[in-house]
Amino acid sequence: MIAENLQRIRAELPEGVLLVAVSKTKPVEDILEAYRAGQRDFGENKVQEMVGKKDQLPADIRWHMIGHLQTNKVKYIVPFVHLIHSVDSLKLLRTVDKEARKVNKVQDVLLEIHIAKEPSKFGFVFEDLLTLLREGTWRELTHVRICGVMGMATFTDDHEQVRSEFRYLHDCFDRLQQEFFAGASHFREISMGMSGDYPIAVEEGSTIVRIGTLIFGERNYL
Ligand SMILES: *Cc1c(COP(=O)(O)O)cnc(C)c1O
């Protein structure tokens, strides 16, 4: 089933859009099944769960941290994580820089931007992010590389609402690129789109989709 699901989704994705298989709450056997079907990028939202699974799985898996990250846990993932999608404060960015320096690595990250109507989701308010980046101290951080943005749309059946939120994130990306990352070829990622809304996200220019349920089935939260 997992292999078929992957195949179906991959066939729909345009070239150049990365599929991150979101394996949170799912056992290592499921991840291995996806791995055997050629999948290498996996997303988790909890540090402990990611670390625990990583040790039981092939070393060439690229791990993506997609969930809210506490500064005191950064050190556990930086040695191996491929991309952190969920940087939502300067404090967190500084911590990632510090931990990456310790292991002699430049850590790729995305800036999470709040695009949904729901108040509970994490992420920078875009205007606050602009203010913060204009202050310029982030430029001193030599062990993080900001590769783009990430966002989660409102959980709703209103496709136009979702589309306008993704369009807004693309807009934020364009503005950041213009003002802070002009000519930086690594600043190119827009991580948006989940099981319920990824076709819209792709239409709006997503470069990374994060899909769980459509690959692994419904999650049981215990
Ligand atoms: C769980 C999760 C996903 C995947 O959600 P599905 O609806 O199962 O595809 C994507 N992004 C984030 C940040 C998540 O926490």
Image (cartoon, rainbow, N blue to C red):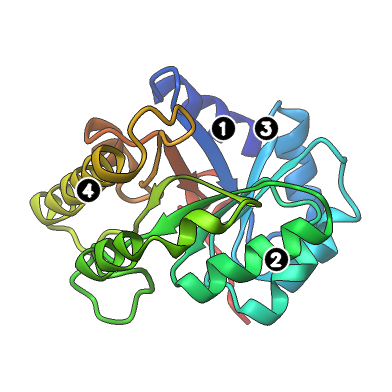
Mark 4 vs mark 3: in front: 4
Q: Could you give the CA–CA distance between mark 3 and mark 2, rounded to whole angstroms? A: 31 Å
> Position of 17 compared to 4: left or right?
left
Looking at marks 4 and 2 on the same chain, the residue that comes earlier in the sequence is marked by 2
Mark 2 vs mark 1: in front: 2
Q: What's the mark number on residue 166?
A: 4
Residue lying at the far left of the rendered structure: 160
Q: Which residue is mark 1?
A: 6
Dot 2 falls on a residue whose secondary structure is helix
Looking at marks 4 and 3 on the same chain, the residue that comes earlier in the sequence is marked by 3
Q: Quadrant of residue 96?
A: bottom right
Q: Which residue is mark 2?
A: 98
Q: Could you give the CA–CA distance between mark 1 and mark 4, rounded to whole angstroms? A: 23 Å
User: Residue shown at 30%/65% (left/top)?
Assistant: 129
Mark 3 vs mark 1: in front: 3
Q: Which residue is mark 3?
A: 39
Q: Could you give the CA–CA distance between mark 4 and mark 2, rounded to whole angstroms? A: 32 Å
Q: Considering the image in quadrants, where does the C terminus appear?
A: bottom right
Dot 3 falls on a residue whose secondary structure is loop
Does the residue at mark 3 contact the one at mark 2 (Cβ under 8 Å)?
no
Does the residue at mark 4 contact the one at mark 3 (Cβ under 8 Å)?
no
